[in-house]
Image (cartoon, rainbow, N blue to C red):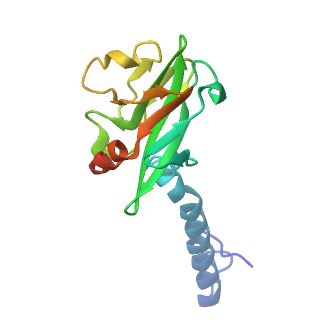
């Protein structure tokens, strides 16, 4: 039996009050368990698959890249995930760290949507056609890769040098 709020018709027993308090506490706990993860689900950038490494270089096959859509990768170094993305724009292969020039301390990186990469921290968008220019203070940091024998190479040493951004 539930207690009557007015306490006039059916006064509550101590047992009824305890059941009611336990129910309120349990419901509050369950609600917190459902809501709490939402605040932290996107607090850090995701880890991506590793690209192939041959000797001192990361090796990307440009034929595997979908034109104008960045492909994200993660390089694991000294317990850190160093993420970057590679894309093919107008026949040219480009690479960038998944770290913003000004927002990198928040370690959230970028997301791709509708022809743009967007900083997960400040929501500034950049068209993939303007990434190489690096305008403003919030822009993806460029990685100097090179084409060699039909493959795009990124020196691992360059990724390791940027570990402080991750």
Residue 111 appears in view: no
Q: Quadrant of the N terminus?
A: bottom right
Indicate left or right for 91 with 96 as reference. right
Residue 83, image x and y in percent? 44, 44
Q: Residue at x 45, y 56 (%)?
A: 76
Residue 151 appears in view: yes
Indicate left or right for 136 with 98 as reference. left
Residue 154, image x and y in percent? 43, 37
Viewer-proximal residue among 57 and 158: 57
Q: Quadrant of residue 98?
A: top left
Residue 60, image x and y in percent? 55, 35
Viewer-proximal residue among 134 and 121: 134
Q: Residue at x 28, y 46 (%)?
A: 105
View extreme (right): residue: 1
Please count the marks in the image.
0
Residue 75, image x and y in percent? 46, 50
Indicate left or right for 68 with 4 as reference. left
Viewer-proximal residue among 53 and 33: 53
Q: Residue at x 53, y 39 (%)?
A: 59
Q: Residue at x 68, y 79 (%)?
A: 10
Q: Quadrant of residue 95?
A: top left
View extreme (front): residue: 149
């Amino acid at each position: 039996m539930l207690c009557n709020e007015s306490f006039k018709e059916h006064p509550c027993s101590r047992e009824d009050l305890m059941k009611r308090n336990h129910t309120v506490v349990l419901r509050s706990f369950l609600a917190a368990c459902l809501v709490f993860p939402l605040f932290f689900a996107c607090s850090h950038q995701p880890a991506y698959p590793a690209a192939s490494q041959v000797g001192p270089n990361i090796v990307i096959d440009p034929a595997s890249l979908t034109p104008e859509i960045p492909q994200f990768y993660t390089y694991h170094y000294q317990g850190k995930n160093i993420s970057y993305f590679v894309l093919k724009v107008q026949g040219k292969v480009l690479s960038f760290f998944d770290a913003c020039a000004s927002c990198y301390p928040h370690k959230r990186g970028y997301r791709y949507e509708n022809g743009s990469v967007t900083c997960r921290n400040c929501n500034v968008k950049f068209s993939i056609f303007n990434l190489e220019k690096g305008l403003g203070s919030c822009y993806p940091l460029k990685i100097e890769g090179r084409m060699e024998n039909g493959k795009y190479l990124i020196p691992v040493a360059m990724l390791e040098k940027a570990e402080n951004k991750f």
